Image (cartoon, rainbow, N blue to C red):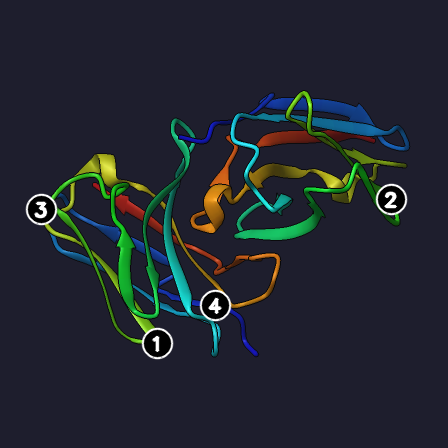
Amino acid sequence: DAGVIQSPRHEVTEMGQEVTLRCKPISGHNSLFWYRQTMMRGLELLIYFNNNVPIDDSGMPEDRFSAKMPNASFSTLKIQPSEPRDSAVYFCASSGLAPYNEQFFGPGTRLTVL
Amino acid sequence: GEDVEQSLFLSVREGDSSVINCTYTDSSSTYLYWYKQEPGAGLQLLTYIFSNMDMKQDQRLTVLLNKKDKHLSLRIADTQTGDSAIYFCAGVPGGFKTIFGAGTRLFVKA
């Protein structure tokens, strides 16, 4: 398996633009997580899905952020409109039914909002 | 909610042992974890310990769990420059979402 796939790996955009980050989880995994990592705030859980259904979105910063999981093999995180303070590395992770709940992380998308 | 705390930095010399400490507040996690993040990469599970164990050894890694004090530690023997990374302590209280600590940045001096 190729692991968790994220695209793009790097994104540079201007304030006010819409940004869409994409994630393909590991096949067979039933949970998917979106995280944001910055030096100041560390690793933050934004939202997680179980069987394609959003379970907890309490970490989503504000209405500018939205996430969807239309099927078991694809998820998006959208920021509209983007702001400079959204600059961060965004990680997607997935986990399956392994008894010890290991999360498999993608390589991340480094977002820079100018 | 669950709180997981770690010291932010640790610096050791190559060949020495490293000990990274973590404290947590919610003891309901069935497993406790150590993840490693290398520069420019996502987190990767390094090792884990079942909550009814006190110790787990895996090659150069030793995990100690003190349930009474809610303290978890990771010892890396014979630390190498390739061990330089950020190490995250984590638990899954209630069996749902994983709660990560802030991460300990390990610097290994040659």
Q: Which mark is residue A72?
A: 1
The subunit carrying tag 1 is A
Q: Position of residue B16 (x, y in %)?
A: 88, 28
Mark 2 lies on a secondary structure that is loop
Mark 1 lies on a secondary structure that is loop
- The correct choice, above or below, for A48 with respect to B38 in the image is below
Q: CA distance from mark 2 to mark 1?
A: 37 Å
- The correct choice, above or below, for B103 with respect to A30 in the image is above
Three-letter code for the amino acid on which mark 4 is drawn:
Val
Task: Establish whether labels 2 and 3 are both on one chain.
Answer: no
Q: CA distance from mark 2 to mark 3?
A: 49 Å
Q: Which mark is residue A16?
A: 3
Mark 4 lies on a secondary structure that is loop
Mark 3 lies on a secondary structure that is loop
- Which residue, given by chain and number where applicable, does mark 4 sit on? A4
Three-letter code for the amino acid on which mark 3 is drawn:
Gly
